[in-house]
Image: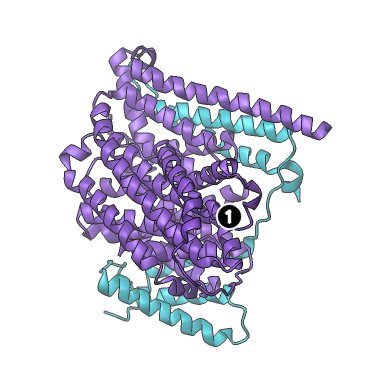
Chain colours: A purple, B cyan
Amino acid sequence: MGVFLGTLIGVLPGIGPSGTISILLPLTFTFSPVSSIIFLAGIYYGAMYGGSTTSILVNIPGEAASVVTCLDGYQMARKGRAGPALGISAFGSFIAGTFSVVGLMFLSLPLSKFALLFGPPEYFSLIIMGITFVTYLAQKSMAKALVTAAFGFLLSFVGIDMITGKPRYTYGIPILSDGVGILPLVMGLFGVAEVFKNLDSPETRSLFKTKLRGLLPNRQDWKDSGGPIARGTLLGFLIGVIPGGSSPLASFASYAVEKRCSKRPENFGHGAIEGVAGPESANNSAFGGGLVTLFSLGIPPTVVSALLFAALMIQGIQPGPFLISEHPDIFWGLVASMYLGNVLLLFINIPLIGVWVQILRVPSKLLHPLILLFCIVGAYSIRNTLFDVGMMMLFGVLGYLMDKFDYEPAPLVLAFVLGPILEQGLRQSLRLSGGSFLIFFNRPLSAILLGIAGLLIISYFFFKKQREVLDVKDETA
Amino acid sequence: MMFRRIGSDVIGSFFWIGVGIFFAIEGIRLNVGTFKNPGPGFLPLIMAMLLILFSLSIFVMGLTKSRTPLSNIFWKRQFIAVASVFLYIFLLEFVDFLLSTFVLMCILFGTLLKERNKWIKVPLYSAVVAVATWLIFYVAIRVPFPFPRFISIWS
């Protein structure tokens, strides 16, 4: 059910996997924790598969990670090679998805044992490093990403203070004692804001008619795609492990690597199969990489894993180093479902391509009011209060304006989720040290994590300076 | 027009500085505590100060570097969408889910559809959507929608 819904969402432009997971998350309240996580994860990797179908056939990326696939996938379709493009995309996704599950299995356990060495100072430093990574990897400006991250942390402080029990920023509103809900926040920033953005632009969908022949790639296609799939899989997985290393970033990085590695870089953008195989593999394996950090350290590196984090918390399960030992059913259930889900996707995606294309014909002016209505019902059904609907709309307006002013919402959501852990880490560390900040530098692991964060900031300014010098040289030339 | 002359970064930074000042003042009121024993306002104050600091850097960049033009904001449709949802929240207190959803959908479809025969399509689509969502969310999933004070079709 999850992978089917995910593919459907991946096909439909207008609402990405983050918005969809947040809308459908309240449905999982009646599920068992294992089923809930399997369902939500299925939506995500289903969306990764679905997004590529429309990118190739109609040049419309269903979600952000499939934008790159449009470049060569659509050109292949125009040349009558839609079948091999879809085929290699499905096989590449399958191989990468399976590899990432294996990686998740083998990395999570040792990493979670290592994470048991973490105390409050290490958790504090880990979050500082994670947020530095997220803002460093921001596609727009690092300063703007830092602003949204700081705002995300501030929002996370709304509610009862966990140490003193004192209400903060609640102003006598009882429902705010539980804090700002993550689902109204994500639904607003990713669902409602997306609807508002789409209201701006008139509909410009044109469906390119192509006949699908021979979905199986030929021997030459496999020869050309083998390397890109292997590199994309590995690169995507590694990017996924890094906080902020999302699937879109993995697919863009893989495309750049393939173009550089290729003997015929001039073919890129004109229907090179490597430009489909690499990014499609990378965006699928990034998800598995992201789960490693979530399950071993309890730190969600992307918005989608933040939603899985929220889903676990709602089910009364604390993500962190103890998750695998205390709830092995959740971890191994998800691993098993991901194997099965990848096989299922391979078999449902290709025969249903015709159906997905037909779904694209639904006009967006009918779709957007529906998305808005689902957001309203989703936000209401979390705590059965209309207050959350109002909050969601406010975050929707904020998300829309943030987009207009070039601010990214992802650092805000991640900081919001990590805020309570950061605060607990800082306050407990200061109590332990008697008020000395040196505790973060005296402990080797904490010092290393802060050192990495420091290096990232220095390298950002260094490369920024270099870019400016190059820009000046370009202008004078 | 004024927005374009000043630049979006400067306007944006004003907003965030305002947010930062608000959180900082409230943080101080909450009791900041000491380094040895940080209070509930300790980290909010630090974060608010960082927010102000980062916003100031954007403000300075906005003044000194080339001004990023603000991409067009089309207020009308968004305003209707936001206003109709708040009207919907208000309506749900008095009228039941089916009727309120029908009204909401009529406003939204009415704003977006441009066809000549939209006055037939709008109520038709709205009725279909209202009934379908009621069946899915109330009958199948059992979401407890607020009980209306006045008009209710299903009870």
Q: For residue B114, which quarter of the picture?
A: bottom right
Q: Chain of mark 1?
A: A
Q: Is residue A105 visible?
A: yes
The answer to which of A239 and B55 lies nearer the viewer is: A239
Identified at 60% across, 56% down, the residue is: A71
Please state if A202 lies on the left or on the right of A316 as rendered. right
> Residue A359: horizontal and vertical position, in percent?
47, 73
Please state if B11 lies on the left or on the right of A178 as rendered. right
The answer to which of A305 and A159 lies nearer the viewer is: A305
Please state if A65 lies on the left or on the right of A376 as rendered. right
> Residue A338: horizontal and vertical position, in percent?
29, 53
Q: For residue A138, which quarter of the picture?
A: top right
| Count of numbered labels shown in the rendering | 1
For the N terminus of chain A, the quadrant is bottom left
Q: For residue A77, which quarter of the picture?
A: bottom right
Please state if A387 lies on the left or on the right of A458 as rendered. left
Identified at 57% across, 34% down, the residue is: A142
Residue located beneath label 1 in the image: A272
For the C terminus of chain A, the quadrant is top right
Q: Secondary structure at mark 1?
A: loop
Q: Residue furthest right?
A: A476
Query: Circle 1: is it few (<14), some (14-19), or many (20+) Cα within 10 Å?
Result: many
> Residue A66: horizontal and vertical position, in percent?
51, 55
Up the image or down, A304 lies above or below A218; here it is: above
Identified at 56% across, 85% down, the residue is: B119
Task: Tell me the kind of residue under disc 1.
Answer: Ala
The answer to which of A81 and B16 lies nearer the viewer is: A81
> Residue A394: horizontal and vertical position, in percent?
49, 53
The answer to which of A176 and A342 lies nearer the viewer is: A342
